[in-house]
Image: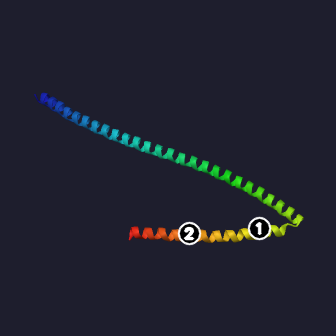
Amino acid sequence: MRVFLLILLLIFESTLFADDKKEDSFSCKQELDLRDSIIVSNDSVFRLKESLYKNELQLEKEQKANYESSYNLMKKEYSDCSFSLQKAVEKAEAEGVSQVISDTLSNEQTSSSSKTKIAFGATFLSGMAIGAFLFSLFF
């Protein structure tokens, strides 16, 4: 009889521990699933950031190439213009027309200086108007 009770007790304990093991394995599976989902979401975020940074880097490279080509074009045009101007000045000096050029330049400078004064005054007044408008909005 004792043996029979002992066997029943062992069977009862094994069923109790088997349920605990099932619950433990289920909780472990849930933890693993949660961890995997977090890893997948973090991975997708990092991949998105990586693609964003690659796109920004590509854009910067294209802008740099554009700026360099613009700079080289301006540099070439400046050298062409300065060379042409130098040739024109040499030709004018050879013909003795330097006085006419300087008179023309002085007339252009006086007209441009009056235009500059008008532009400066208009800019100053528009700045004051914008400042007064912003002041009235905020205070």
Between 51 and 28, the residue placed more toward the observer is: 51
x 45%, y 71%: residue: 132
Residue at numbered disc 1: 104
* Above-or-below relation of 86 to 25: below
Question: In the image, 58: left or right of 134?
Answer: right
x 59%, y 70%: residue: 120
Question: In the image, 104: left or right of 127?
Answer: right
Question: In the image, 10: left or right of 38?
Answer: left
Cα separation, mark 1 vs mark 2, equals: 27 Å
Tell how many labels: 2
Quarter of the image with the N terminus in it: top left
Residue at numbered disc 2: 122
Write down the quadrant of residue 34 in the picture: top left
Quarter of the image with the C terminus in it: bottom left
Question: In the image, 57: left or right of 103?
Answer: left
Estimate the x, y position of residue 86 in percent, counting from the top left. 82, 61
x 83%, y 60%: residue: 88
